[in-house]
Amino acid sequence: MDGARFEPQDPAFAERVRASFGKQGAMHTIGATLGEVAPGRVVIELAWQQGLTQQHGFLHAGIVATALDSACGYAASSLMAADAGILTIEFKINLLAPAKGQRFRMEGTVLKPGRTITVVEGRAIALDDGREKLVATMNATMMAITGRDGIKH
Amino acid sequence: MDGARFEPQDPAFAERVRASFGKQGAMHTIGATLGEVAPGRVVIELAWQQGLTQQHGFLHAGIVATALDSACGYAASSLMAADAGILTIEFKINLLAPAKGQRFRMEGTVLKPGRTITVVEGRAIALDDGREKLVATMNATMMAITGRDGIKH
Amino acid sequence: MDGARFEPQDPAFAERVRASFGKQGAMHTIGATLGEVAPGRVVIELAWQQGLTQQHGFLHAGIVATALDSACGYAASSLMAADAGILTIEFKINLLAPAKGQRFRMEGTVLKPGRTITVVEGRAIALDDGREKLVATMNATMMAITGRDGIKH
Amino acid sequence: MDGARFEPQDPAFAERVRASFGKQGAMHTIGATLGEVAPGRVVIELAWQQGLTQQHGFLHAGIVATALDSACGYAASSLMAADAGILTIEFKINLLAPAKGQRFRMEGTVLKPGRTITVVEGRAIALDDGREKLVATMNATMMAITGRDGIKH
């Protein structure tokens, strides 16, 4: 798995991913920014803020999931055809430790691309006082949608 | 399962849940409000807004997950001892249909309570032009934490 | 969801499901038998035996999953076209209690049918000294496959 | 994550794991054998046979899950105290490709050990005509049980 490299179908995949990310109101609301956009791999960055917390002041598990889901979705999208839309079918997230930190890096990496179904793994890493810690892991199934109005990219 | 009724350990569970919900910055940010709080069952309500969307204008899967995770967590918490904190260990969400609608109702219902581990089911229902539609289902594992500083309720 | 009724596309769905079940070597090996086969709902039954246990003498979680996966897969298959094959994309199982009992009933019920993707819920019920107990719950994503050699029904 | 090394609490962990594996009737029935047993990592091997198939002749998804669940459970158990029993709380499996092959290698690797909860990742690799292929990935949550009769190792 490590070192797997994928060939993008759409040479303009990075622009397509960045344009689609810009339309996600949720990413704007949580203050997430797009980092690396490579074939089969997308990184999203996020800073802690009070408005993203659960009751103990950690990042809310759902916010971790929100940023990871986008990272995983765009990792899948980066390998799809130019006209394919993408929808999350399902994901599972394991919270390994409280999401405590100043900044968070959400990494989505394609495990198995496919014409219809793409399986992606996500990792959420907290940066807490200069130390990195894996705080969550995601397994997501993404589906390519073509020819349906209103669902593009 | 249907019709299962649970006996709360803490008679003040509803006040405890409401106070904890009030501390979740993420719930405030997404505009979620707490509806029903019953033993083993909690409902959270949410209105669509541009700031919660993915790229097609539907509610972002992660935002659906965020509200469902809180509903499931508080459903579990409602059955716990007064001094127990609660953490999400993991959840899985299946997105059955695009989360299209004006309002959303997130229902968390305990399937199996336990001293340490509680398993909860969540359902996300979209209200779209007066019609109700099940758009997502969640399965979550919650853990009771006692005696750890900084993790209460 | 409860009381949802589905219309089968293939009037001969039950014969098709029964014939396919008969080809599953794994069902024969674990001694599973097919019970109810209705549109969107399939039940599989199983007796405890030493050869199906984990180290404490309970039914192995994987064996619970094996029978539940078949129940969920055939529940999905019952609603598909006559020439569609079916593959499990993913499932998640929560083990709510040790699978202790003399007999087990595995129920698969379609939550959301679809042309390509069908989402199914499974429940494993143990019959232990005349008492019924829910011991596991499954959430599964099934995919219809058409036109691929070697993958039929 | 790669290269993570764990310190076992119980120096006799490998003997303990091997003895427990020997008590799993299900492993005997499916013909699984124990390979590598290292701190936080356990490998189980399995040969294809007709009695383990689904309807297309591939290894049944549930049988893949059964062997992976044992690999993951013992990977967790290898890091636990000598008197701790272990139970699977939940797992999720993604089937990336049909489990086609002559032999299968199931790898369980601990991602995050804990006093009560241990999270483990599993990988199922098919050996098909001399080629290796990743056919499934698992994410499992294991729980240490102490002081409960009938649940040891």
Image: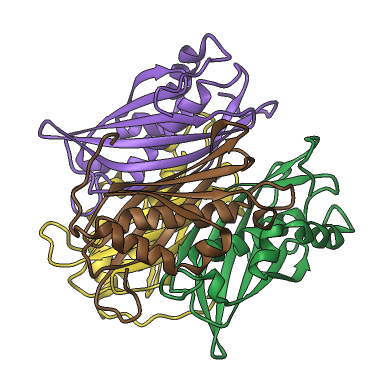
Chain colours: A yellow, B purple, C brown, D green
Q: Is residue C150 above or below residue B90?
A: below
Residue A32 seen: yes
Residue at 50%, 69% in the rendered image: C25
Q: Give percent across and percent down for residue C76.
A: 31, 55
| Residue sticking out furthest to the right | D11
Left or right position of D106 against B30: right
Task: Determine the image quadrant of residue B136.
Answer: top left
Q: Residue furthest top?
A: B11
Left/right placement of residue D11 relative to residue A114 reads: right
Return the residue nearer the eye: A55 or D68.
Answer: D68
B39 or A72, nearer to the observer: B39
Residue B26 position within the rendered picture, expressed as x and y whole percent measured from the top left: 39, 34
- Note whether D52 is above or below C99 in the view shown: below
Residue drawn where x is 31% and y is 34% of the image = B30
Q: Is residue C118 left or right of residue B147?
A: left
- Residue A88 visible: no
Image spot of residue C98 (x, y percent): 64, 41
Question: Where D16 falls versus C122 (above or below)?
Answer: below
Q: Is residue A20 above or below residue C6?
A: below
Q: Position of residue C111 (x, y in %)?
A: 31, 45
Identify the residue shown where x is 71% and y is 55%.
Answer: D76
Q: Quadrant of residue C101?
A: top right
Which of the image's four quarters has the C terminus of chain A? Answer: bottom left
Q: Looking at the image, which residue is at 47% across and 52% down?
A: C68
The mark tally for this picture is: 0
